[in-house]
Image (cartoon, rainbow, N blue to C red):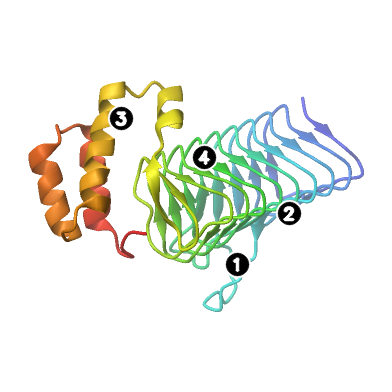
Amino acid sequence: MNTISPLAFVSPEAKIGEGVTIHPFAYIDKNVIIGNNCTIMPYASILNGTRMGDENKVYQGAILGATPQDFSYHGGDTILEIGNKNVFRENVVISRSSSTEGKSVIGNNNFIMDGVHICHDCNIADHCVIGIKSIISGNCTIDSHVIFSSMVIMFQDTHAGAWSMVQGGCRFKKDIPPYIVTSSNPTSYYGVNVEVMKHFNVSEKTIQHIAQAYALIFHAKVSIADSLIRVEQEVPMSDEIQNIIDFIRNSKKGLI
């Protein structure tokens, strides 16, 4: 059974699942899908083109499915696709895609903190934390288990690899490879994200091999291409090491 305040606006064209709570003064647009057991707090807006899964919570003042701030957008019903069990705190703004060929995507179990702005055509995977007032520019990709501290700025078309952590106030225009911590401005390699990986039961041996790989990549006085050859030759191979190699070789913006 749904609990929908008579003081909320819910378009008759919206599709609402079971067990949904919509508080007073929330706005649910046409062409919106909200899954089961979601909670929409007062003054939150779920706009045209938003597709939301189950057990999401949207706090006061959040705007999901905002019109993209992109000069290439010329109207039309584009998409923001949201998975399950996400939290969108106060005043979060997430834009839908700029064209019908793409979509903005938020996966599952993410925590998006107060004042975060996520621009058009971004793809955020699962179990990420995006800190207070961080800005993610258009066409960015964030892999799973990434943590951004507060007021991070991620420039357009960049990629943050899985299990990486970006410390507060960092701004980056190049890609951040997986499993590392970055700090300072210009943003730079600070070390391996040991504590978070331990929390998720990544083995000590695997963490040591990741640290060994990054010592070769960031501290050896050779090219990145030569560093990766040394990683393949000197570091025991695992899924994590192969992920590092593939990420760096496929990077389009280069590394921080």
Quadrant location of residue 55?
top right
Taking the spot 32% from the left edge, 59% from the top edge, the residue there is 255
Q: Could you say which is closer to the camera, residue 35 or residue 145?
A: 145
* Residue 143 sits above or below residue 120 on the image: above
- The residue indicated by pointer 2 is 29
In space, the residues marked 4 and 2 are separated at their CA atoms by: 27 Å
Q: Earlier in the sequence, mark 2 or mark 3?
A: 2
Q: Could you say which is closer to the camera, residue 209 or residue 156?
A: 209
- The residue indicated by pointer 3 is 207
Amino acid found under the numbered disc labelled 4: Cys
Q: Could you say which is closer to the camera, residue 163 or residue 219?
A: 219
* Residue 2 sits above or below residue 171 on the image: above
The spot of residue 49 in percent (x, y) is 61, 56
In space, the residues marked 3 and 4 are separated at their CA atoms by: 20 Å
In space, the residues marked 2 and 1 are separated at their CA atoms by: 16 Å
Q: Secondary structure at mark 3?
A: helix
Q: Could you say which is closer to the camera, residue 13 or residue 196?
A: 196
Amino acid found under the numbered disc labelled 2: Asp
Amino acid found under the numbered disc labelled 3: Ile
The numbered dot on residue 68 is 1
